[in-house]
Amino acid sequence: MQTMQMKKLLLGSVLAMSSVLTVTACSSVNASTEATPTTSKMQHKGMKDGLRGPMAQLDLTATQQAQIKAIMQQKSGDRKNDRSKHQAEHAQMQQQIQALVNANTLDNAALNRLADQQAAKTKQRFIERIQTQRAISQVLTAEQRAKMAQLKSERTTKGHHGSKNHKMHDRAQ
């Protein structure tokens, strides 16, 4: 009975880790394809001067647009340069996960090391995202930052980004 529970726990952990890695990989692919818009993407609704979302509504000067594009291109370049390294790390982690899954007994220390590695990667991506957002924010004037905050708030209220949770929460109340 205890072996069955351990297998279920291990399987659940592996599935959760696989889901996290899949979402991470998809996010990285989406982020790298969205960071430098192509001509067809630039014609997308809400795009102005190659910027999208709330940024397109801030009436940025040409200098500000160039600075923001440079920040985004730098971020995109960093991701592209690290892609093969990340792919190798991902393959190695998958091998370690498979070894844990196939082992007769669960090595909790190895499982914790893998979980810590994944948490460190998630933390680093979070830090980099906030640093990028801050760098862009520093290019904006105080009025543009206020307008950006207002536009983001309106988007959230209208149901973008996490709308399912907001709607479900509102229904429960």
Image: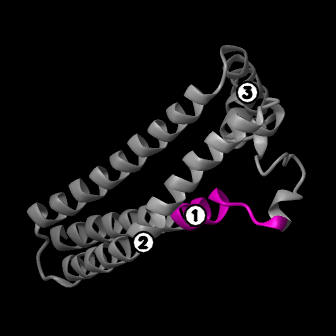
Amino acid type of the residue tagged 1 in the rendering: Ser
CA distance separating discs 1 and 3: 34 Å
Question: Is label 1 or label 3 in front?
Answer: 1
Disc 1, SS: helix
* Vertical side of 25 occupied by 68: above or below: above
Q: Earlier in the sequence, mark 3 or mark 2?
A: 2
Give the main secondary structure, helix, strand or loop, of the magenta stretch. Answer: helix
Disc 3, SS: helix
The answer to whether marks 1 and 3 mark residues whose Cβ atoms lie closer than 8 Å is no
Residue 114: quadrant of the picture = bottom left
Residue 128 pos. (x, y %): 42, 45
Residue 83 disc label: 2
Q: Which quadrant would the C terminus be assigned to in this image?
A: top right
Residue in the image at 52% along x and 63% along y: 28
Q: Is residue 25 left or right of residue 46?
A: left
Task: In this rendered view, identify the residue nearer to me: 63 or 77.
Answer: 63
Residue 161: quadrant of the picture = top right
The answer to whether marks 2 and 1 mark residues whose Cβ atoms lie closer than 8 Å is yes
Residue 99 pos. (x, y %): 20, 82
The magenta stretch spans residue 157: no
Q: Earlier in the sequence, mark 2 or mark 1?
A: 1
Task: In this rendered view, identify the residue nearer to me: 29 or 75.
Answer: 75
Residue in the image at 20% along x and 76% along y: 100
Disc 2, SS: helix
Around disc 2, counting alpha carbons within 10 Å, would you say few (fewer than 14), some (14 to 19), or many (20 or more)? some
Around disc 3, counting alpha carbons within 10 Å, would you say few (fewer than 14), some (14 to 19), or many (20 or more)? few
* Vertical side of 36 occupied by 165: above or below: above
Residue 32 disc label: 1
Residue 170 disc label: 3
Which region of the structure is painted magenta? Answer: 27-39
Residue 158 pos. (x, y %): 82, 32
Question: Is label 3 or label 2 in front?
Answer: 2
